[in-house]
Image (cartoon, rainbow, N blue to C red):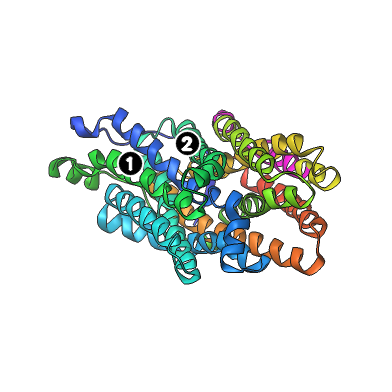
Amino acid sequence: MSVTQAQPAVATTVRTRTKLAHPALLLFGIVLVALNMRASLAAISPLLGEIQRTFGLSATASGLITTVPVLFQGLGAPLTPRLTRRFGAEKVVLGAVLTLGAGILLRVLPNSFALYAGCVVIGIAIAVLNVSMPGLVKREFPGRAAAMTGVYSTSMLIGATLAAAVSVPLEKVFGGGWEGSLGAWSLLALVAALAWLPQVLRSRQERAAVAAAPAGRPIEGIWRNGLAWQVSAFMGISSLMVYTLIAWLPTILVDHGMARGEAGLVFAFSNLVQVAGAFLVPLIAGRMTRQRGLAVSMAALNATGVVILLLAPVSGAWVSATVLGLAQGGSLGLALAFLVLRTDSALGAAQLGGMSQAVGYLVAAAGPVGAGALHQLTGGWELPLALLLVMAAMAAAAGWGAGRNRVLR
């Protein structure tokens, strides 16, 4: 195990591609796959109250609808590098997208067991995509890894924004049923799978060349490495804040007197603003030798947005949504950028991604259910939001360490 000062990444292989694997098709496939990676989670938040009433769920049980996918993102992440080594990243991504579509359909079957089983399947599928994509981007775009991270993290949030914005209108389109609204997102997964097929249908000769290309040495003793833990902690705490508010922001606003439709619009707007943060922050990070100040800035913006939500939940909702959107999108983009900036190979990026997302999403899973339980216990949202301020301070400390100019080897 070692940590060395970062050096510019150098491409070690050049591959001749078939027309089916043209870089434009690869980019198109990455974007469509990424659109699915948050949509199925964001779509459920505006409909959570309806789902809760349908099955007679408590606030804690409702929080599990968001928590279970996040938990299984953490549990599934360490398995992904083995899958990619055995089957190849392209096949693994295709399988994960199809599994995601199946999980979405399972989640809308008319019983609570299927609801939670679908959440498990969705979580595992997203875990595989979360870990596969950084290594794939590092391998295919070695000289522009940070910029491409911005592209796919932005696509993730565009999918989430679209899902949050149209979930309630789709419910009306399908005759007032939340099942049709949620189930419709399986079509997006199918479209992404079709768009990804060109990457799977490469010639055997090209796949053999890719498999033979050097992917770099594994990072030794990664689970004992302080920098790896700092990257993991930054991702985990930032994700906890994101998923907590994905689960409960519309409910918080409605509980303070905002109309359900407007609360959905505020939530969708916050997701829209995240797109800007997710795109710009990785670009900025890629031009910096150290990202310490950037990480602390994201944590500070997160804290500011939560304070506004505490002090003026309705009158300050749009301002809070703006600040939180920039902070959460930027934190996501920066956490993903750390995976390529703190490693020097596709193998290293996948390895760090497996660790950081295993740790990160297990931490994040506590957010939605914990906030729901605290709300049920206290009858208000003040304590859950105050704890998010503590989380923001912890994210700043982790980001200060993760932003050092060092590379895991």
Image side of residue 212 versus residue 61, left or right: left
The answer to whether residue 384 of the structure is visible from this angle is yes
Horizontally, residue 42 falls left or right of residue 215, namely right
SS at mark 2 in the image: helix
Q: Residue at x 33, y 49 (%)?
A: 93
286 is higher (above) or lower (below) than 47: above
Amino acid type at mark 2 = Ser
- 2 and 1 marks in contact (CB < 8 Å): no
**How far across and down, in percent of the image, does residue 290 sit?**
62, 36
**Where residue 69 appears, x then y in whole percent?**
51, 60
Q: Is residue 295 magenta?
A: yes
Looking at the picture, tell me which residue is in the foreground, 215 or 207: 207
Q: What range is drawn magenta here? A: 283-303
Q: Position of residue 234 (x, y in %)?
A: 63, 50
The residue wearing badge 1 is 191
Q: What element carries label 1?
A: helix
Q: Inspect the image, locate mark 1, and give the three-letter code of the amino acid beneath it.
A: Val
Q: Pick whichever of labels 2 and 1 is earlier in the sequence.
A: 2
Furthest residue toward bottom: 113
406 shown above or below 178 = above
| Residue in the picture at 25% in, 40% down | 199
Label 2, on which residue? 155
The nearer-to-camera label among 2 and 1 is: 1
The kind of secondary structure the magenta stretch mainly shows is helix
